[in-house]
Image (tube, rainbow, N blue to C red):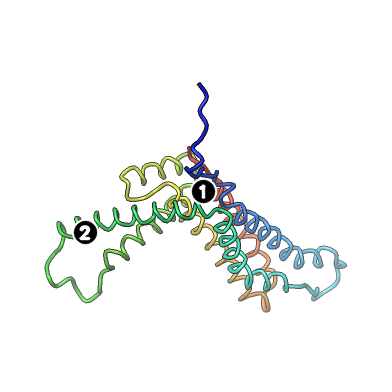
């Protein structure tokens, strides 16, 4: 007997489709980083051996650092516009898991509360702690993925087993962590471009593995 999907039930797209614009933007940015490094290395490579003070170009490096955050934000917005049903579903899951993390934090707080005086440094609120848990999960997955993707995938399933986190949001947090690391490298490249073009070129290249990892995580379907 053959069954057909219920037309009223939105079909969850593969992550590679759901984040296609973001993946394309990250891929473009990787190419720009390579171009920026080439603008420094190519003139040095083609200059006569005896030539001193080779003129190089750092405009692409500077432009990439300034525009990359906006490029990625626009790509995310375009993905959201293409998959409105996915956004609704993801928002519902995020509200549920956030509430679950808050409830768990409140229970742990009640058990471990030391008393009215908690010291001079204010502790995060329950809500802030719940958001930090998601960010920390993304950071942990990124660190593990660099070493062993299979172990990282197993970690995602472990982190989400209790219901306080969802697979999609942990992977999305990992995408953010990897992309931000790449953007920070580009920002540093822009800072040193005027005084040390070679260092700027190296930083542009150093950004690319992080951006490539963000691509991998954006398209990773663990099921």
Q: SS of the residue at dot 1? A: helix
Q: In x, y percent, where is residue 105?
A: 24, 57
Q: Residue furthest top?
A: 1
Disc 1 crowd, CA 10 A, few/some/many (<14, 14-19, 20+): few
Q: Tell me the quarter of the picture where residue 68 sits.
A: bottom right
Which callout, 2 or 1, points at the residue further toward the start of the chain?
Answer: 2
Q: Residues within 10 Å of mark 2 (few under 14, many from 20)?
A: some
- 60 vs 190, left or right, is right
List x then y, in percent, for residue 156. Answer: 41, 45
Q: Which mark is residue 106?
A: 2
- Please name whichever residue, 137 or 76, is drawn nearer the observer in this view of the structure: 76
Name the spot of residue 56 as percent of width and height, x first. Answer: 78, 72
User: Which residue is at 27% across, 58% downward?
Assistant: 102
Question: Which of the 4 image quadrants contains residue 46?
Answer: bottom right
For this view, does 28 lie left or right of residue 52?
left
> Relative to 135, does residue 117 appear above or below in the rendering?
below
Q: Position of residue 47 (x, y in %)?
A: 85, 67
Secondary structure of the residue carrying numbered label 2: helix
> Residue 146 got which mark?
1
Taking the spot 68% from the left edge, 66% from the top edge, the residue there is 201
Name the residue rendered at 85%, 72% in the picture: 51
Q: Nearer the viewer, residue 117 or 175?
A: 175
């Amino acid at each position: 007997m053959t069954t057909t999907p219920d037309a009223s039930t939105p079909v969850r797209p593969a992550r590679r489709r759901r984040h296609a614009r973001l993946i394309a933007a990250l891929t473009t940015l990787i190419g720009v980083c390579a171009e920026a490094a080439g603008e420094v290395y190519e003139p040095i490579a083609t200059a006569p051996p005896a030539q001193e003070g080779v003129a190089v170009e750092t405009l692409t490096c500077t432009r990439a650092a300034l525009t990359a955050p906006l490029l990625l934000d626009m790509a995310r917005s375009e993905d959201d516009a293409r998959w409105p049903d996915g956004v609704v579903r993801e928002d519902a899951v995020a509200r549920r898991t956030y509430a679950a993390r808050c409830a768990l934090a409140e229970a742990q707080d009640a058990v471990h509360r030391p008393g009215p005086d908690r010291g001079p440094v204010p502790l995060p609120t329950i809500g802030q702690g719940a958001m930090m848990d998601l960010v920390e999960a993304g950071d942990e997955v990124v660190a593990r993925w660099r070493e062993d993707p299979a172990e990282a995938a197993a970690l995602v399933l472990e982190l989400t087993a209790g219901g306080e986190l969802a697979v999609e949001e942990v992977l999305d947090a990992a995408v953010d962590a990897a992309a931000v690391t790449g953007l920070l490298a580009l920002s540093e490249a822009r800072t040193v471009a005027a005084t040390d073009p070679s260092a700027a070129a190296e930083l542009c290249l150093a950004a690319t593995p992080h951006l490539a990892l963000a691509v991998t995580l954006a398209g990773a379907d663990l099921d």
